[in-house]
Amino acid sequence: MVNVQVAAVGVLMLLALLAHVLAGVRETMSIRPSSILPDTADRISEAAGTLERNWTQALCAFQLVTVDLLALTALSFLLAFTDLIPQQRPVALVLAGFFALWGVAWLVQLVVLKVPRKNYLLLGHWAFWFLCAGLSFWGAQSL
């Protein structure tokens, strides 16, 4: 039997994965320092090299999230549509906790970075993670 709540999480995760890969990569590529800073002087060139390395590290970390999203999507679909995972309820509860931690981490970052409160909805990934946490928790109750 299909677990509708966990299946909804899988669909949301698939949409997040697609948005992350399609839009997120494009946005991240648009801020590449080498496309912004001219290489006209040694000092600028040295600063540009540092910015390029920092940007590359950030992009690589960004792509690690792609792996997480892919794994969470697959796990959600496996939980929703199969009996391949033993102890499904605890796994769904761990999934809910993981999503909740991502939501908290996102909010903490907004606070630490002193993002104006009016931008919290524009940077509303936290709400997405809390929605996935709630759906996973709800779905765990029927596993």
Image (cartoon, rainbow, N blue to C red):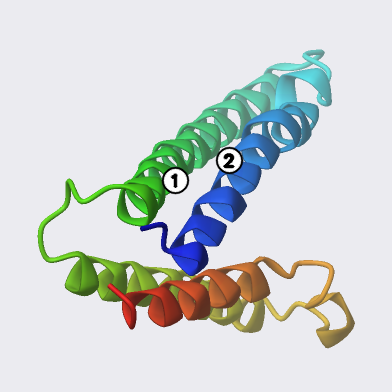
Q: Amino acid type of disc 2?
A: Leu
Q: Which mark is residue 46?
A: none
Q: Position of residue 132 (x, y in %)?
A: 53, 69
Mark closest to the chain's N terminus, 1 or 2: 2
* CA neighbours of label 1 inside 10 A, class few (<14), some (14 to 19), many (20+): many
Q: Nearer the viewer, residue 112 or 67?
A: 67
Q: Quadrant of residue 2?
A: bottom left
Find residue 52 and report its horizontal and vertical position in percent. 60, 26
Mark 1 and mark 2: Cα distance apart in space: 8 Å
- Please identify the residue farthest to the top as the structure is shown: 40
Please state, as top left, top right, bottom left or bottom right, where the C terminus lies in the image: bottom left
Between 75 and 104, the one nearer to me in the picture: 75
Residue drawn at x 82%, y 75% is 121
Q: Quadrant of the N terminus?
A: bottom left
In this rendering, position of residue 94 left or right of residue 96: left
- Say what secondary structure mark 1 lies in: helix
Q: Position of residue 134 (x, y in %)?
A: 50, 80
Q: Horizontal placement of 4 versus 128: left or right?
A: left
Give whichever of 135, 2 is nearer the camera. Answer: 2
For residue 12, above or below residue 124 = above
Where disc 2 sits, the SS reads helix
Closer-to-camera residue (43/127) = 127
Labelled pair 1, 2 in contact (Cβ < 8 Å): yes
Residue type, numbered disc 1? Thr
| Residue at x-position 70% and y-position 35% | 28
Q: Provide the residue designation for mark 1.
A: 73
State the residue at coordinates (50%, 51%).
10
Task: Tell me the number on the disc at residue 17.
Answer: 2
Q: Quadrant of residue 96?
A: bottom left
